[in-house]
Structure formats: structure tokens, C-alpha cells
Image (cartoon, grey):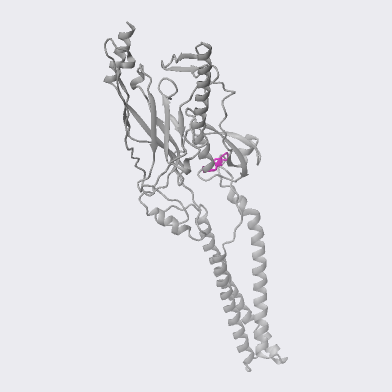
Amino acid sequence: MARQVVDEQLRAAADDRTVPWTVSLTLLDPTTGTLDVVDGPTVPVDRPVVTPQEGRAYTEAEVEPGGGTGTVTFTLPEGSTQVLLDVRIEAPLTPRDRWEPVPAEVAARLSLSTGDGDTVLGPATEGWGAEQLAPPDVTQAAQEDADRLAAEAESEGRDLVETRVDPATGAVWVLDDAVFVPASLDTSGETWTLHGVARSNWPEQTVVVGPGRSYRPPPAEGPFAPPDPAASPDVTVEPVPVALTPEAARAANLEVGDEALVEAFGTDVPVTVTTLVPAVPGTLAPRAALLDRDGLLRALAADDRGLPFPTQLWAATVPGQEATVVETLAGRDDVVSVTGPASGAALVTDATGAARRVFWVASAGAVLLAATGIGAVAATLLASRRPEVAVLRALGMPPVAQARSRALELGGIVAAAVALGLAAGLLVARAVVPELARSTTAVDQVTLAAPLHLEALPWVVILLTGAIAVAAVVLAQATRVRRQALETDYREEIR
């Protein structure tokens, strides 16, 4: 009866002998920080077939070796730079978890190259490992221990072989006096080699080969015993640098240099506070955090997660080139919208620009009004002080001296008035303008610093325009005073 059951299993395995093997790559785009697992097409692999013969032992049965080979092509975005983080190998030995009646020895080879023929595996991946597969030296040492114990048991006439069955999958593991011989993985060359035995040590789950991964032997109670959390090595993740707003730091009771856990992208990310910032780009919330992208990417990769595609990108440009960069980006088809200090297709982020332009127009009007007033005062003084010119001429003061004296008098008064006006305006601006700007911030928005800043170019233009107008008035007055001093027929009318 047992013979018939095994024969049926062998025939069923022969009818469904092909299993799909899959190789996947975990790639990082350093430009965007996105992490993707790219699956390649499956490679069909045939299992060995044992054809039972009636009345003959299984050791005399006909065996057809299995195997398979294939080339897997990964198509990546053109013009992009990708960093290989790990290689994932899914190599099942039985289709649909079917019972494998005969354990087969498995040997696999894997190589990876670019479209130009450059090898990817080799020195750059030397030292990579997997948790389910051991380095060749570990496997060899375990095999030597198992052989030694088997020889001792044979000499003593006792049996060391212990068979255990996984109740979840039905897989069978053979232990030699608790000496488990793991499947091996050799990543020292340009071609990786994997070696194991079905129903003994070949992993049924996906094997992840990458840097920082190492073989984890099964627990002492056996490969199917639940893992001991205390014995499991913790994955060391460097804290991610983070910048917090002052409100967020106060709410979390954190200071610069403190470490904490931040829940982000579905996991807890260890962070260390490196600095405090007034606000975070992209949000007006008073409580916000700005994490280092590369550090966050490494932390998520340790949890087999990746960054989602960004919805916004903030960039700094060379000073003075903001408008050019914004207009160039606005003309790209792959950019939905651009916000920056420019015009045209881009939006304007300077919320106070319109108000400042209005004030500059008002300043220009004030200078024009002041120049007109100074001209009117100068004209009035020319008429009212005409007798003074005749008296000074009679006293012997030359016409040029009178013109120079009147010019210095008017110019000095205007210069003193301008200096006092600038000083008073600066003091009033420092006391009023920042608070006035901050008062426009909503209650539930972050309060940004509002430093007082002088726009030198329009200020200099308006100041020079006013100076030219005043100089013209002073020069006209001096010329008129000189002419009055040269008139010898003027007599003051006394009534």
C-alpha cells in the first residue's frame, strides 16, 4: 500500500514538473529617492523525474535530471541612474506546495550584467549575504561536524538522524544530532552560486541577498521552532537628521541633539534633532518636520519600504537666476506647475510684492511733490529777499558770493531735512513694519520671521532723482540771485 502511494506521488510530480523561478531587483533612484522592486519574467525550471518500475527498488528507478536556464531582461527608465540595493530570488521546488516525494539536490548560478555587457556582480557585491543561506565556509564547517557525528554514531551503533516535519507546509527537515547543514550562497565572484537540498535546507520563501545581511541559523529547538525575539539581532538603523519648527519641538519636548521616533510612511523612523527652523517648505502648519531624504531612504529600505513619488520639489538656485530657472521649468511638458519669483507662466510667491510696488510709486510721488514744494519755496524767497540782495551788494558782497551763499543755505536745509527724514523713517519702519507684516498671518499658520530689508536699487533711483531735482532748483535759485546782484538800477520801493 505504501509503495502504491509513493508511486502515485512520483507520477503526479512527473506530470507537473515545471516550476517558475523569479529574480527581482530592488533599485534606488538617487535623484528622486524612490525605491522600486522590479520583477523580471519567470524562468521555467524542471524538477528531476523519478519513474518507478514495478517490482524493482527505487534505487534502481530511472531518473531524468531536471534543470533550466534563462535570460531575464530588466527594462529601466532611459537616462536615469539606478542603485542596486538587493537581489531577490524566489526558487520554489514544488508547484502549488505539492509534496515532493524525492529530495533533490539543487545548484543554481546567477550572473547580472548591463546592456553594455558590464558585470554588476563582483567586487561591488562581495560580502553580500542572506538570512536563509550561509556562506560556503559556514556550510562546510557544519557539514564536517555532521559527518564527524555520523561517523561516531555509526561506530557506536546508534542513529543520529532525526526527521522533523513542518506542520504548516509539510516540508521535511533532516537533522543530524541537532547539527543543521544550511544551504550555501557564494557572492565572492561575478557569478553567484547557490547550493542546497530539497526537503532539507533549501528555502521555500523568497531569498533577499543584499549588503548588511548575514545568515541566521535556526533556533536550537529546531528550524520550525518560533524565533526567540531576544536572540534575533536588531537591525541597526542610523537616526535620520531632522529639523523641527519651534512649535513642534515644544510640543514634543525636544531640543537640538535629542533622539526620537517619528511615525512616517507607515513605520517608525528613528531621528535626531539637528536644528530648529522657522518653517518647513510646502506647509504653513506651525508643527512640522523636515527629514533628510537620504537618511530617511536608508531607514525605510531597512524595513523594505520606499519613498513615494514626491508631489512637490523645492530647489535653490544661483542668486539672481531665479526667474530664468522658473521660466525654463514652466516650459517643460513634464512639469505641471512652477511657483517662484517670475512672471508669465509661473506663479509669483512674493505676497508683499504688489504692496511694495505701491509704496515705491507713492515714494516717487512724494519725492516729486517735495521737489515741487522746494521749487515753490525757492521762488517765494527770490521775490521776498530781493531787497536783501541789493543791501549785500551795497555792502560789497560780490554776486558770485551771494549766489553761493544762497545755494549752500537751501542745499544744507534740504540735506538736513532728508537725513532727518531717512533716520525717522528707518526707526518707524523697524518698529512698525515687521509687526504689521506678521499680523497678516492666520492664527493656525506658522509665524515667519519678517526682517526689515532695504531694496537698494529702487531706493537709490528715487534718491538720485530727488537729488537731481533739488540740485536743479538750487542751481536755478543761485543763477537768479547772481542776476539780481548784477542789476544796478534796482531800487527798493519805500512807501
- Relative to residue 398, is residue 465 drawn left or right? left
Q: Quadrant of the N terminus?
A: top left
The question of residue 341 being in magenta is answered with no
Q: Outermost residue, right direction? A: 395
Residue 99, quarter of picture: top left
Residue 406: % across, % down? 66, 82
- Relative to residue 301, is residue 250 drawn left or right? right
Range shown magenta: 285-293
Q: Residue at x 36, y 24 (%)?
A: 93
Q: Is residue 110 above or below residue 1?
A: below
Q: Quadrant of the C terminus?
A: bottom right
Q: How many discs appear?
A: 0
Query: 105 or 228: which is nearer to us?
Result: 105
Residue 61: % across, % down? 30, 17
- Relative to residue 71, is residue 166 drawn left or right? right
Query: 5 or 263: which is nearer to us?
Result: 5
Q: Outermost residue, bottom direction? A: 488
Q: Is residue 495 visible?
A: no
Query: 266 or 280: which is nearer to us?
Result: 266
Query: 439 or 263: which is nearer to us?
Result: 263
Residue 197: % across, % down? 41, 23
Q: Outermost residue, top direction? A: 1
- Relative to residue 401, is residue 123 drawn left or right? left
Q: Is residue 438 above or below residue 152?
A: below
Residue 315: % across, % down? 49, 51
Q: Is residue 229 above or below residue 404?
A: above
